Every structure is written in structure tokens, then in C-alpha cells.
């Protein structure tokens, strides 16, 4: 497409949004339509805050700015890399996180629970929190900011992911209270935790094979789980009771594997949570419920 030589921000947004629409991109990594995707890319590329004044839309782009935006637009369309990786930043619970191909792009509906401080699930603020399968650290870091007295552990098997998690701890000034741990699930962790939050890999290979190209840029380690997606969630259910405090709580996302999990474990009293802003497949189980369910999980 031939672009006008002088464009203001609004014109660029309109053009890029049209280009995205024609390219039939997949949206699922922070936005769900071409206009929002264009805003995400253009504002990030130009360093414009998302809550900027409308006057900013009339600003004319310099030649350098146009070149920068157009290169990113071309790459988004040709390589199908999600915008978050192109601009190295994703938003979760209203907070910015550094991301690249070493971590999944944050998008868990858990953000809504964190922003509501898990009301009404917690009786009191948690003193020790674990974000298991942390990736960029988004869930644990947002939780640490929601509970200023909590100590938070971020754990992941991927040393590469933990480099970014550490960067994000620094970005949010949480070095004293949030720490990273390389661990295969709970293997290198010391409980007990009052709250365990987890968005583990839960996608079967068959489902991965059918995902749009955008997902192929994400680490397979962050998506894939054996046994029809359930192997890792089931192992976490078996191990979690030993790492929870007496009245602790596990909150875990299993996405669209939730039906398969509920069918596999009909005797486990999963509390499936509802979300005002969309999302499904997140359950809560108390430490007591998990301990009672252990014979069913063996
Ligand atoms: C679905 S991603 C979630 C990332 C992040 N919590 C989020 O919500 O954006 C799952 C993460 O689990 C990690 N992971 C995979 N297998 C693991 C294991 N056995 N033990 C610990 N972490 C694991 C992956 O490296 C990946 O970062």
C-alpha cells in the first residue's frame, strides 16, 4: 500500500488499521481488533502514552518516525510476530512488562482477580505468595504490588524466562520482596505459601498444531503439556497441598482444558471463577480441599 508522505498520528492509525485488516492477522496477544492493534504498535513505536491527550493525534510524524512505524508494520504482517514482541512490551493488570520470545505474552484473566485483590476468595492478605510457571513474572509482580506486605516467589523451569522476570522485578522496584527461583514445578521451592497462583502450560500438541501463526513465536515450553494438556496441571494439583499453608489457596488457570480436567476429576470440588472482563478456565481450591482430594489425584 502506498502511504502519504506526511501523516499525522491519526492518519497513520487509520492506515495501519486498514493494512492489518487486509492482512487478516490474528489478534489474541493483548488486543482483539485491527484498530487496537494499530494503536498498540504505533503508540509504542512512537513512545506515546496510551492515556495521551487527543491533541497528540494531530502531531505529524517525522520521516524517521514513519520509517520506524512502517518497518514494524511490515514485520507484523510478514512474520506474524505479535506486537508485544516487536515493541518488547506487554501490559498486564494495567502494568507494563518487558517481554520477548523467551516468555509467553501476558494475557491471563487472573489480572482481573489481582486487581480485585482476590475478593472474596482470601480471608486476609497473603504473607507468602508463589507465582508458579511465572514466565515474565507478570502475575507475581502484579500481586506483589496489590499486597505491599507480601513476599513473592516467582518460579519457572526456564532460566531464559527468569532473566526477563528479573528485569521486570527491577522495572517495578520490587527487588527486596520478590525473588526468582529456577525450579521444575515445586522441586526447588520451600513452602508454605498462603497463595499459589499458576498459569501453567495446558495445551495439547494437537491444539498447538492448529493455533494461528502468531502463537508459533511463543516458547513451546510455555504452552505444551502432555496427556491432552492435563499432565502439568495434574502434577501441580498433586504437589500443591505440600506447599500450601494450613488455610492456603491455589488458583490455577487451565483455559479451555477446564472441561477435560473437570471430567477427569469429577470428585474434586473445583470452584470455577467468573470474569466480568472475559476469560474462563480458572479455578480455586483451598489447601484443605486439595488434601481431601489427594486419593482421587493419585
Ligand atoms: C503459560 S506460560 C505462563 C507465563 C506467565 N505466568 C503468564 O501468565 O504470562 C507457562 C510457563 O511455565 C513454564 N514451565 C513449563 N514447564 C514448567 C515446569 N515443569 N516447571 C516450572 N515452570 C514450567 C514455562 O517456561 C512458561 O514460562
Image: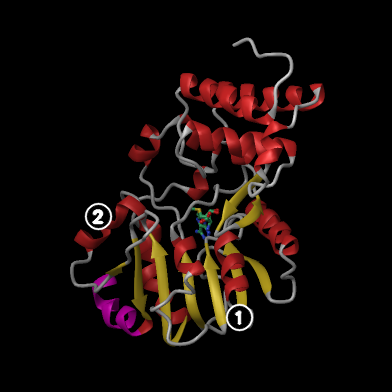
Q: For the magenta stretch, what is the residue range?
A: 288-298
Asked whether residue 298 is in view, the answer is no
Disc 1 element: loop
User: Between disc 1 and disc 2, whose residue precedes?
Assistant: 1
Give me the C-alpha separation between circle 1 and circle 2: 34 Å
Give how far across and how far down residue 112 sits, in percent.
46, 63
Q: Residue at x 65, y 14 (%)?
A: 3
Q: Residue at x 47, y 30 (%)?
A: 213
Asked whether residue 173 is in view, the answer is yes
Question: What mark, if any, has residue 260 been given in the picture?
Answer: 2
Q: Nearer the viewer, residue 260 or 13?
A: 13
Q: Residue extending furthest bottom?
A: 246
Disc 2 element: helix
Mark 1 neighbour class, 10 Å CA radius: few under 14, some 14 to 19, many 20 or more: some
Q: Residue at x 47, y 79 (%)?
A: 243
Question: What mark, if any, has residue 150 been given in the picture?
Answer: 1
- Label 1 CB less than 8 angstroms from ligand 1: no
Amino acid at each position: 500500500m502506498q502511504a502519504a508522505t506526511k501523516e499525522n498520528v491519526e492518519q497513520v492509525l487509520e492506515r495501519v488499521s486498514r493494512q492489518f485488516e487486509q492482512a487478516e492477522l490474528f489478534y489474541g496477544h493483548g488486543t482483539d481488533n485491527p484498530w487496537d492493534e494499530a494503536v498498540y504498535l504505533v503508540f509504542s513505536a512512537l513512545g506515546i502514552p496510551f492515556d495521551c491527550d487527543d491533541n497528540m493525534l494531530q502531531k505529524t510524524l517525522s520521516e524517521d518516525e514513519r520509517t520506524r512505524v512502517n518497518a514494524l508494520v511490515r514485520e507484523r504482517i510478514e512474520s506474524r510476530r505479535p506486537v508485544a514482541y516487536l515493541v518488547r512490551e506487554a501490559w498486564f493488570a494495567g502494568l507494563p512488562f518487558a517481554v520477548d520470545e523467551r516468555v509467553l505474552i501476558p494475557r491471563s484473566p487472573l489480572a482481573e482477580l489481582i486487581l480485585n485483590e482476590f475478593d472474596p476468595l482470601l480471608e486476609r492478605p497473603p504473607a507468602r505468595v508463589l507465582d508458579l510457571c511465572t514466565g515474565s513474572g507478570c502475575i507475581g509482580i502484579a500481586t506483589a504490588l496489590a499486597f505491599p506486605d507480601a513476599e513473592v516467589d516467582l518460579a519457572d523451569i526456564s532460566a531464559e524466562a527468569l532473566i526477563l522476570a528479573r528485569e521486570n522485578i527491577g522495572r517495578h522496584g520490587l527487588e527486596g520482596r520478590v525473588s526468582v527461583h529456577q525450579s521444575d514445578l515445586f522441586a526447588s521451592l520451600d513452602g508454605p505459601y498462603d497463595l499459589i497462583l499458576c498459569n501453567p502450560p495446558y495445551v495439547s500438541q494437537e491444539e498447538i498444531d492448529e493455533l494461528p501463526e502468531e502463537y508459533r513465536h511463543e516458547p513451546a515450553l510455555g504452552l505444551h503439556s502432555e496427556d491432552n494438556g492435563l499432565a502439568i496441571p495434574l502434577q501441580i494439583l498433586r504437589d500443591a497441598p505440600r506447599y500450601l499453608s494450613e488455610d492456603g489457596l491455589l488458583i490455577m488457570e487451565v483455559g479451555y482444558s477446564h472441561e477435560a480436567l473437570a471430567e477427569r476429576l469429577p470428585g474434586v470440588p473445583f470452584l470455577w471463577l467468573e470474569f466480568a472482563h472475559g476469560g474462563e478456565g480458572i479455578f480455586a481450591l483451598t489447601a484443605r480441599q486439595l488434601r481431601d482430594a489427594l486419593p482421587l489425584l493419585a
